[in-house]
Amino acid sequence: MAKIVGIAGSLRKASFNATLLRAAAEHVPAGSELEIASIQGIPLFDQDELERGVPEPVARLKERLAAADGLLFVTPEYNHSIPGVFKNVIDWMSRPAADIPRLFGDRPVAIMGASTGPGGTRLAQAAWLPVFRVLGTRPWFGKQFYLPGAGKAFDAEGKLSDPTTRQALADFVLGFAKFVDQQKS
């Protein structure tokens, strides 16, 4: 069974990316699991604070990532790039540097995202690739999933309104779960 940890890179309560992550969890194939992790409570990275000890929210998230077979990043796009709050989380996860192999090294990772704009999160997703490289992850380059017009994409219950979009999300989740399973073998 593939255990995937998903992280939405937004703090907003009504985050379209958190909604997308919950929608993705509905499409996880039998035999796999998508555990949703939160970035709430992660402080701004500060080397001085790290020297005093790893903050509890950071330590909890590190343990969740270490126990995962694969990671699913659901990224917003701010100013055509990576949101600072999400990058901050990864900066914490990669400190001390000795934690990088334990949390990221050769671990399958996929990325998707939702945006109110017409381009989905294409630029943010591309901006994550050098970060994935330096962390030593194994990015999945199968199906891509960008959700443009996110403000109108979900119904009142947080379900994707369009059946074609729902199917594309299901295909994305299935493809990544299979990739994670293959990497475990």
Image (cartoon, helix red, strand yellow):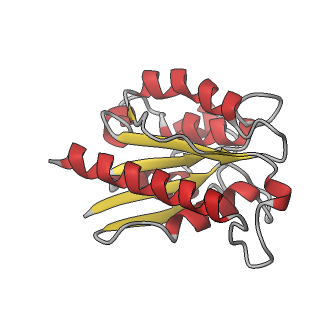
Q: Is 132 situated above or below 17? A: above
Residue at coordinates 57% horizontally, 34% vertically from top-left? 91
64 left or right, relative to 152: left
Percent coordinates x, y for residue 19 in the rendering: 69, 64
59, 152: nearer the viewer:
152
Q: Is 181 situated above or below 99? A: below
93, 78: nearer the viewer:
78
Q: Is 94 situated above or below 61? A: above
Query: In the current view of this chain or complex, which residue is farthest to the left?
Result: 185
In which quadrant of the rendered view does residue 18 lie? Answer: bottom right
Percent coordinates x, y for residue 86 in the rendering: 66, 42
Tell me if I can see residue 47 in this picture: yes
Residue at coordinates 60% horizontally, 42% vertically from top-left? 89
Percent coordinates x, y for residue 34 in the rendering: 44, 64
Q: Is 176 situated above or below 48? A: below
In which quadrant of the rendered view does residue 37 lie? Answer: bottom right
